[in-house]
Amino acid sequence: MGVIDATISVCLTHHFLIAMPAMADPSFSRSLTYICEHNEQGALGIIVNRPIDMDIATLFERVDVPFEAAARESSIGAMPVYFGGPVQTDRGFVLHRPAGHWQSTLTVKDDIGLTSTRDILLGMGATGIPSQILVTLGYAGWSAGQLEWELSQNAWLTVGADPQILFELPPEERLPAAMQLLGVDFTNLSEVAGHA
């Protein structure tokens, strides 16, 4: 009997990672992470359901980005900033729709982009656009093969992402909504999952 290659080639870009209840890492306990990039070098994502005690207007003030009248008329100033993950927590990342044309944007899928350059903040501060945004401090990163190994250990459930969950639902509703995409209720999820 031959050896079966256990490595599965799957791309999880534009997918949600749902932390299993037994997740020991406090950074990811009860988290919903949106995967922005996944390839043979590793994976990058942002946690989308962990608002911190700061709104976007306060962040702009702290990083000396002007908040013009047009932006103040939009609702972006009152939006929360999120804990995006344990890597580079002093650096901001903007998940946005449409992707637009910024200095350094990773196009995730179709019209969704992830930008980490100051020009998007200046644009948002001047015009309030893009208005479909999620601003984080930090991100989640996995080295080559690490995410695949964690999946094999039942650390995560995965499901294709829905932009409506990212941009239209309040943070506390995002994890339950992602679970509903799988047809699972988080409260009924077992602490231990078995291998099929």
Image (spheres, helix red, strand yellow):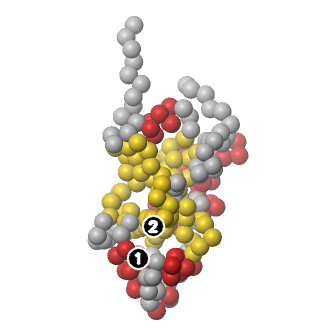
Residue 67 at what x, y percent from top left? Answer: 46, 86
Q: Amino acid at mark 2?
A: Gly
Residue 69, compared with residue 52, is above or below; it is below
The residue where tag 2 is placed is 92
Secondary structure state at the residue bearing disc 2 = strand
The residue where tag 1 is placed is 121
Residue 146 at what x, y percent from top left? Answer: 44, 38
Left or right: where 138 falls relative to 106: right
Secondary structure state at the residue bearing disc 1 = helix
Q: Nearer the viewer, residue 55 or 181?
A: 55
- Quarter of the image that includes the C terminus: top right
Q: Residue at x 52, y 55 (%)?
A: 85
Which residue extends farthest right? 187
Residue 151 at what x, y percent from top left? Answer: 50, 36
Residue 41, compared with residue 163, is above or below; it is above
The crowding category of the residue bearing disc 1, from other C-alpha atoms within 10 Å (few below 14, some 14 to 19, many at least 20), is: many
Q: Quadrant location of residue 153?
A: top right
Which residue extends farthest top? 1
Residue 141, compared with residue 192, is above or below; it is below
The crowding category of the residue bearing disc 2, from other C-alpha atoms within 10 Å (few below 14, some 14 to 19, many at least 20), is: many
Q: Residue at x 38, y 66 (%)?
A: 116
- Quarter of the image that includes the N terminus: top left
Residue 156, compared with residue 90, is above or below; it is above
Which residue extends farthest bottom? 69
Residue 144 at what x, y percent from top left? Answer: 38, 39
Q: Are marks 1 and 2 in contact (CB under 8 Å)?
A: yes
Q: CA distance from mark 1 to mark 2?
A: 10 Å
Q: Amino acid at mark 1?
A: Leu
Q: Quadrant location of residue 189?
A: top right
Left or right: where 2 falls relative to 177: left
Q: Nearer the viewer, residue 103 or 158?
A: 103
User: Mark 1 vs mark 2: which is more N-terminal?
Assistant: 2
